[in-house]
Image (cartoon, helix red, strand yellow):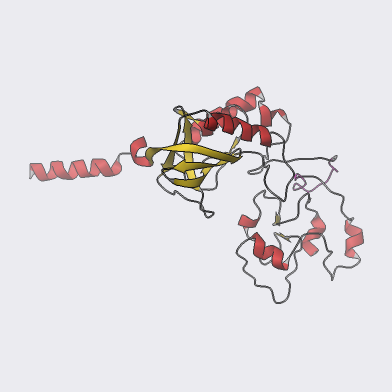
Amino acid sequence: MKLLKMFIAIILLFILVPQKESQALSSKYNVQYVSVVDGDTAYVKLGKKTIKIRMLLIDTPESKDPRKPVQPYAKEAAKFLENHMRYGRLQIQYDNSQKLDRYGRHLVYLYANGKLVNNEMVRYGYARVGFIYSQKYYLNTLKKSEAHAKKKQYKIWSIKGYVNPLGEGFITRNKPVVKSTTKYNTVSNIVSTPSTSSVQKSPTTSRAGYPTSRYRSGAPTVLANCTEVKKYYPYGITDSHISYQPKFDRDKDRMGCESSGMQYQSWFANN
């Protein structure tokens, strides 16, 4: 009986004790550098296979998004990553909860000469902490590095208002910001828009060139991605549209799959 109780106690101990690193994370795999896509994405060779990796828990300025201009420090972030990868002994490590994203990219922690590159990107101001997946093993480590970079005003933190405080991403303004009472006027490349009064004169038709809130007859109400959205709504949709989904609105500006350089206006809710 004593042996049985001891056996049960040992089993419970394994179940209840928090995961150690070796259990929460995979083994480290040696990889070879192929190329850098941007500051948080790259190609490496794992064995004989070339794979695309997306670094976990970080978000760097955009340089490849066709909907956005090249953002400040995007190229510098890519170069910083390239310097680590081209000249370092590289390893990748998975968080065991999920290994691939929906685009087939490998979600990894990247090491160069033993250093966690994800953390280096954040510590020196080339990246912010950002995540949409469940892997968060090094989250506290990266948050400490982010606080350090923010205090020192390194790179992305040297531009006031550049790091989006309302969610992931960055805010770029190439033109003076027009003061507005709406809290959603912080987006890339502010553009001039018609006044509310001029739009209200013809409320029954959607104004071309702007995201719409109106359902197009014959269009599916459920759309899978931005390609499908733009097939029926070339300029995007607002959060008032029946087909709107949060995944279409990564910058959380109340517009999904919108054209580049668009600022949300209150009249879009009736467009």
Q: Position of residue 43 (x, y in %)?
A: 53, 43
**Residue placed farthest to the bottom in the image?**
218
Q: Is residue 132 above or below residue 117?
A: below
Q: Position of residue 90 (x, y in %)?
A: 46, 33
Q: Is residue 9 above or below residue 200?
A: above
Q: Position of residue 98 (x, y in %)?
A: 44, 49
Q: Nearer the viewer, residue 150 or 61?
A: 61
Q: Nearer the viewer, residue 194 or 173?
A: 173
Q: Quadrant of the C terminus?
A: bottom right
14 left or right of 128? left
Q: Quadrant of the N terminus?
A: top left
Q: Is residue 81 above or below residue 270?
A: above
Q: Nearer the viewer, residue 251 or 106?
A: 106
Q: Indicate yes or no whether the magenta region holds residue 187.
A: yes
Query: Which residue sits at x=62%, y=61%?
Result: 225
Task: Read off the magenta span.
Answer: 177-188
65 left or right of 26? right
Can residue 125 be spotted in the picture? yes
Residue 204, by quadrant, is bottom right
Residue 196, by quadrant, is bottom right
**Residue placed farthest to the top in the image?**
152
Q: Indicate yes or no whether the magenta region holds residue 24.
A: no
Residue 243, by quadrant, is bottom right
- How many numbered marks are there? 0
Query: Which residue sits at x=82%, y=40%?
Result: 174
Query: Which residue sits at x=79%, y=40%?
Result: 173
Q: Position of residue 16 (x, y in %)?
A: 29, 42
Magenta span: helix, strand or loop, mainly?
Answer: loop
Can residue 55 be spotted in the picture? no
**Residue placed farthest to the left in the image?**
1
